[in-house]
Amino acid sequence: MIINRPGAEFIYDGASYKIGDRIIGTSESEYEGLYGSIFEIRDGEDKETENETPDIYCSFEEPVLPHQIKKLEEIFSELYQEPKKLEDITLDFVIMSPEMVRVILPDPKPLTQTIYSVQEEWADRGEYGSCISQAYTSEESALQFMLKQLREEMEDGLVSGMRSDKKFVEESYDDSYECFIDEDYYENHYRIFITSQQIIVTPEFVREMAGIYHLAMFTEDFESMLEQEDDITPEERAWLMTQSDIIDKISTSFDNYDSFWDCYWEVFRDIAEEKLKEYRVNNNKDEKGTNHGN
């Protein structure tokens, strides 16, 4: 069997491989870390190799990072027992087995998140500088940090020193503060302000954050449960909360708790049925109210 029609799918060992799929070489391959795409799949009598697995024909992009090029040349030089340069290595017609490639699934509709950071700029008698704080997902958190930094500068920093000058000028808004010596701005000034930027949030990041949130929720609920148990002493509660494996056990138990998942999916079914009833009732009303007369 030969598959080469764009978009055609081949299922092997539960995994899907499509013609045109973006892939990356895995650690099982000499092409580890290189990106490419699938252009043909062969199985059965049409295979060119003697592997038990299907032949996946891939075209890889030429690496651009020097260390990747060097690594690839070293791997193939050792493989062929002679020096190999990048131009000697086949990239556009490579037969791979399934474990040698990982399909890169296209991202769903991008999720975005606004992040906020605090930026400082200053000049002190001709010495210039700037810095940016760590990023925050909350503007309020960034504002708190900005006010903390500004307070330090006003109490025992650059702003404190400039305030004694008769030509000292300052301006402020909800998310920024600036001061300077009039007619000498470029030599003596201080500015602090909040900047914002939208970032693309990957599904992997969302899942990671959800996992962290669930572990924190399990910890909080477990501690709350312990406080309500009269037969557990304060010393025993304190000891239980130091056991690092408990939360992992709780998480694993939920995964294996069939009754929990039965209830979980039942909620989805109940809500779907409820909304469908509304939809069907409204559709029936619309159909009855339609005038088909001449």
Image (cartoon, rainbow, N blue to C red):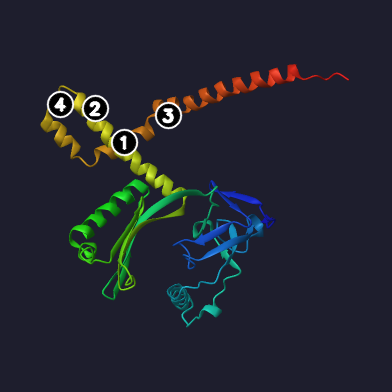
Task: Identify residue type, mark 3.
Answer: Trp
3D distance between C-alphas at marks 2 and 1: 12 Å
Q: Residue at x 31, y 36 (%)?
A: 217
Up the image or down, 105 lies above or below 69; here it is above
Q: Residue at x 46, y 73 (%)?
A: 65
User: Which residue position holds label 2?
Assistant: 225
Whether pointer 1 and pointer 4 mark residues with C-beta atoms closer than 8 Å, the reply is no
Q: Nearer the viewer, residue 141 or 15?
A: 141
Of the two numbered discs 3 and 1 on the same chain, state the one appearing first in sequence. 1
3D distance between C-alphas at marks 4 and 2: 10 Å
User: Which residue position holds label 3?
Assistant: 261
Whether pointer 3 and pointer 1 mark residues with C-beta atoms closer than 8 Å, the reply is no
Residue 198 in percent (x, y) is at: 46, 53
* Residue 217: mark: 1
SS for callout 4: loop
3D distance between C-alphas at marks 1 and 4: 21 Å
Up the image or down, 60 lies above or below 82; here it is above
User: Which residue position holds label 4?
Assistant: 232
In this picture, residue 156 sits left or right of residue 9: left
Q: Residue at x 43, y 25 (%)?
A: 263
Whether pointer 4 and pointer 2 mark residues with C-beta atoms closer than 8 Å, the reply is no
3D distance between C-alphas at marks 3 and 4: 30 Å
Q: Can the viewer see residue 138 in this picture?
A: no
Q: Residues within 10 Å of mark 3 (few under 14, many from 20)?
A: few
Residue 11 in percent (x, y) is at: 59, 48
Residue 17 in percent (x, y) is at: 58, 53
Task: Identify residue type, mark 4.
Answer: Ile
Task: Identify residue type, mark 2.
Answer: Met
Of the two numbered discs 2 and 3 on the same chain, state the one appearing first in sequence. 2
Q: Residue farthest to the front?
A: 166
Residue 183 in percent (x, y) is at: 33, 71
Observer-side mark, 4 or 2, equals: 2
